[in-house]
Amino acid sequence: MEQDVLITGGSLNGACLALALARAGMRVAVIDPLSDAAQGVPDFDGRSYALAAASVKMLGVLGLWERIAPEAQPILDIRVGDGRPGEGAGPMTLHFDSRDLGEGPLGQMVEDRHLRAALLAALAEAPGIRRIRGAVAAQRTEPGRATVILEDGQTHSAPLLVGADGRRSGTARRAGIRRQVTDYRQTALVCAIGHERPHDGCAWQIFLPPGPLAILPLTGNRSSIVWSETAAQAAAIHALPDAQYLEVLRPRFGDFLGEIRLAGARHTYPLDMSVAESFTAERLALVGDAARGVHPVAGQGLNAGLRDVAALAEVLVEAARQGEDPGWPLVLDRYARWRRFDSGALTLATDGFNRLFSNDNPMLRLGRDLGLGLANAIPALRRGLMREAAGLSGDVPRLLQGRAL
């Protein structure tokens, strides 16, 4: 065995885990069916991520942020409100102002093409990381190791196998880990827009009856849109020509950005919640969407995955320094216990917010508006919610504090 850890899935979470472990002296192999050319995105295609402040600190420790920072847009304010198509957000909004937190921006918006390019470059440069192209056909556990067999017949082994291969994780399925899946019967429409007026670094989350609408600031006079509709309505909207698509989008959030235009490709993806019943198994750990895929209502999908990565990396590096087997059940249990509460709370929160706000019930609307107004009026509560959104609350792993392992 030439490596301490095998990672299946070399996208964002898998790549960050490989870098974190390699920087601490561990030997890592990353198995990915996609080539660099397939993963690279030379032109803007509309995809972007809202990185919490803690995630930005982690990328800094991994040597990635200096590559990304020139292309990032700071999130200085977040506004959350109820709304209806044609009316925009209602008068009762929850406002997070980064100046109240006193720790810089609440987060950063980064386009997928910039984050992915930085990760690919860092992986290529990092010693201690072996990259293997191929798709996994089978896996097994044996005394002291986990082994994967690729479709071309190659076999690779390590004391620990980590699944970072997404919501439909083959790694989890082959290990017999079942998933609890909730179909929201919603579809997210994703695009980027250019607009006449500046966004001033403000991110909006407007809850409309069919589903939430996020307006997230990008560099220049551009914003990323993640817009949820019922599955049937989303399919009809996505089929429209660009001009008619914009005619449907404009009244969803009003005219505070002035005239808008499309600035990149349009995408859709179905929304569900997919949670693994266990984050670990024999000589196996799961991170990111392989462990838990949530509704994008709070923009926490990638941030939750990076929190998994930071916690698992810290557990494995400390175990290695103590001479422990990284696949030992007690080592993996430390990771599972660390992430269990935080991950469960996130799952319940995103599911609850979507169910509570994705309707037009007058009594629920009144209660929601009063709740948002109350939270906004209590400074201590508002600051606590801001710290949670920035990823700075709870038992924060070292990497997310900006500290090396």
Image (cartoon, rainbow, N blue to C red):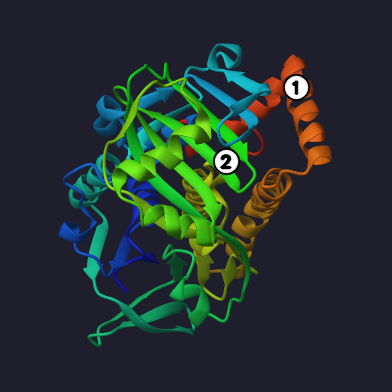
Q: Secondary structure at mark 1?
A: helix
Question: How many labels sit on residues?
Answer: 2
Which circle marks residue 240 in the picture?
A: none
Q: Nearer the viewer, residue 101 or 261?
A: 261
Q: Estimate the x, y position of residue 393 in percent, counting from the top left.
A: 64, 32
Q: Secondary structure at mark 2?
A: helix
Q: Earlier in the sequence, mark 1 or mark 2?
A: 2
Q: Identify the residue at the far bottom of this view.
A: 153
Q: Residue shown at 69%/25% (left/top)?
A: 384
Residue 380 seen: yes
Q: Estimate the x, y position of residue 216 in percent, counting from the top left.
A: 44, 32
Q: Estimate the x, y position of residue 108 in percent, counting from the top left.
A: 41, 29
Lateral position of residue 316 relative to residue 15, left or right: right
* Label 1, label 2: how far apart the Cα atoms are: 18 Å
Q: Which residue is mark 1?
A: 373
Identified by mark 1, the residue type is Gly
Which circle marks residue 298 in the picture?
A: 2
Q: Residue shown at 18%/51% (left/top)?
A: 124
Lateral position of residue 312 relative to residue 32, left or right: right
Q: Nearer the viewer, residue 34 or 396?
A: 34
Q: Nearer the viewer, residue 99 or 342?
A: 99
Instruction: State which mark lies toward you, 1 or 2.
Output: 1
Q: Residue shown at 27%/70% (left/top)?
A: 33
For residue 230, above or below residue 381: below
Q: Estimate the x, y position of residue 57 in percent, counting from the top left.
A: 44, 31
For residue 268, above or below residue 369: below
Q: Which quadrant is the N terminus positioned in?
A: bottom left
Identified by mark 2, the residue type is Ala
